[in-house]
Image: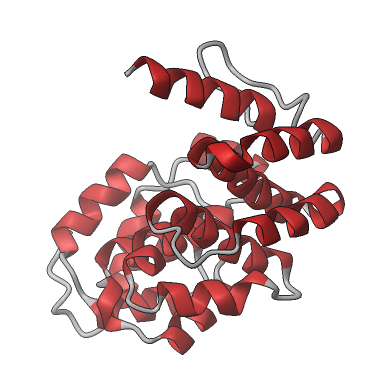
Amino acid sequence: MASTTANDPVAEVMTALAALEDPKARAINERHGDAHGVNLTKLRALAKELKKNDELALDLWGTGDTAAQLLATLVMRPRSHDADRLDAMLRAARGPKAQAWLVNYIVKKSPHAEELRLRWLDDKDPVVASAGWTLTSERVNKSPAGLDLPGLLDVIEAEMKEAPQRLQWAMNETLAYIGIENPDLRDRALAIGERLQVLKDYPTPPGCTSPFAPTWITEIVRRNAEK
């Protein structure tokens, strides 16, 4: 790709992304709600070529194109954006992968992660709320001090069964991590999972752990005990 010092670097990058388009990849991605056909290995190679560039990242995000938004998360710096900008970016994300990459690659490494976790957790938009629960799972794993874990279990028990799919998945993840990381709450987490039956029948490839919380908790606790 030519240097992005051209007059219109965004147009240049969009041309490069179009050249990477694979109709077969697009068909597969669209079945999962992601409207792009770019191979992710090639996308990462393009990001490496571009290097970190926050101005370009914001311009790419603003195009609303899924591949461009994925690329944007790979060239932006997590500490360069305030909470309001990250909030706006999440709400403007196109597709679940762009939302997930923004949360995992940028927000989790941002100094505003906790502020956004609290802002998003009870948001009326289930996609935004799911981001809050994803950040909550991160806290449960890495810095649980100060979290009201029994209170989180109360919310999960009351709301997860009827939650929209993306939100349900994120709440289920938090349920599993609470059970894995907290022996004193494990029985309750297992009981909630058994009663709600969320993701019990989710198709799981051979060799992978089921996302059904009781199975997930039990398997990871077993593995940890064997270490």
Rendered image quadrant of residue 52: bottom left
Residue 55 on image: x %, y %: 27, 83
Residue 218 on image: x %, y %: 58, 23
Q: Which colouring convention does the figure follow?
A: secondary structure
Residue at the extreme front: 184
Q: Residue at x 84, y 55 (%)?
A: 158
The one of 171 and 225 positioned closer to us in this rendering? 225
Residue at the extreme top: 206
Image quadrant occupied by the N terminus: bottom left
> Is 156 located above or below residue 28 in the figure?
below
Question: How many labels, in total?
Answer: 0
Rendered image quadrant of residue 191: top right
The one of 81 and 12 positioned closer to us in this rendering? 81
Q: Is residue 92 visible?
A: no
Q: Residue at x 36, y 44 (%)?
A: 40
Rendered image quadrant of residue 186: top right
Q: Is residue 20 visible?
A: yes
Image quadrant occupied by the C terminus: top left
> Is 119 located above or below residue 152 in the figure?
below
Residue 224 on image: x %, y %: 40, 24
Q: Residue at x 41, y 47 (%)?
A: 38
In the image, is 216 to the left or to the right of 126? left
> Is 173 located above or below residue 133 in the figure?
above
> Is 4 located above or below residue 200 in the figure?
below
In the image, is 29 to the left or to the right of 114? right
Q: Residue at x 52, y 53 (%)?
A: 137
Residue 216 on image: x %, y %: 59, 28
